[in-house]
């Protein structure tokens, strides 16, 4: 079953674009281990928040991505720019009108 991870990352004032750049870099290698979608977004009404939407072939694929050196390096680079405020939801996708 497809696994979804949707969340927000609070960033320190003035660092939103830097976090977006880090998380949006191509070639993290996640596409080779089951990442179906990885979208990073912003909302001008929340200037110190970054939104992330992920779809994975499985929860195990998501967990495996956290072991990739490229992903670990991106997390380490972004961590000092984060405020510590985070929220989100994880769930198993059970249906979609767009996919069969």
Image (cartoon, rainbow, N blue to C red):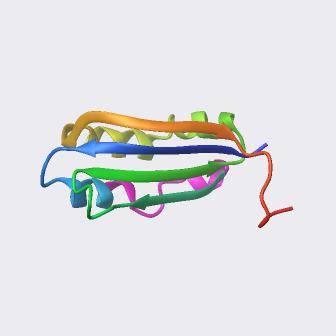
Magenta segment, which residues?
Answer: 22-34
Residue 31 lies within the magenta run: yes
Residue visible at 62% across and 45% down in the picture: 4
Q: Residue furthest left?
A: 14
Question: What is the x, y in percent for residue 2?
Answer: 73, 46
Residue visible at 44% across and 64% down in the picture: 26
Q: Return the residue nearer the eye: 96 or 64.
A: 96
Residue visible at 80% across and 63% down in the picture: 99
Question: What is the x, y in percent for residue 3?
Answer: 68, 42
Question: What is the x, y in percent for residue 55?
Answer: 62, 51
Give residue 86's quadrant in the image.
Answer: top left
Give residue 76's quadrant in the image.
Answer: top left
Give residue 11's quadrant in the image.
Answer: top left
Question: What is the x, y in percent for residue 80?
Answer: 19, 38
Along the horizontal axis of the image, is 1 left or right of 12?
right
Residue 90, compared with residue 19, is above or below; it is above
Q: Residue furthest right?
A: 100
Residue 42, compared with residue 93, is above or below; it is below
Q: Return the residue nearer the eye: 94 or 55.
A: 94
């Amino acid at each position: 079953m497809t696994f979804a991870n949707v969340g927000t990352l609070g960033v320190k004032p003035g660092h939103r674009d830097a976090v977006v750049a880090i998380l949006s870099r191509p070639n993290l290698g996640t596409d080779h281990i089951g990442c179906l979608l990885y979208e990073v977004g912003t909302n001008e009404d929340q200037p110190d928040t970054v939104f992330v939407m992920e779809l994975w072939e499985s929860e195990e694929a998501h967990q495996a991505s956290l072991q990739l050196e490229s992903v670990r390096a991106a997390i380490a680079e972004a961590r000092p720019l984060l405020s510590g405020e985070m929220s989100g939801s994880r769930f198993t996708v059970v249906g979609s009108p767009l996919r069969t």
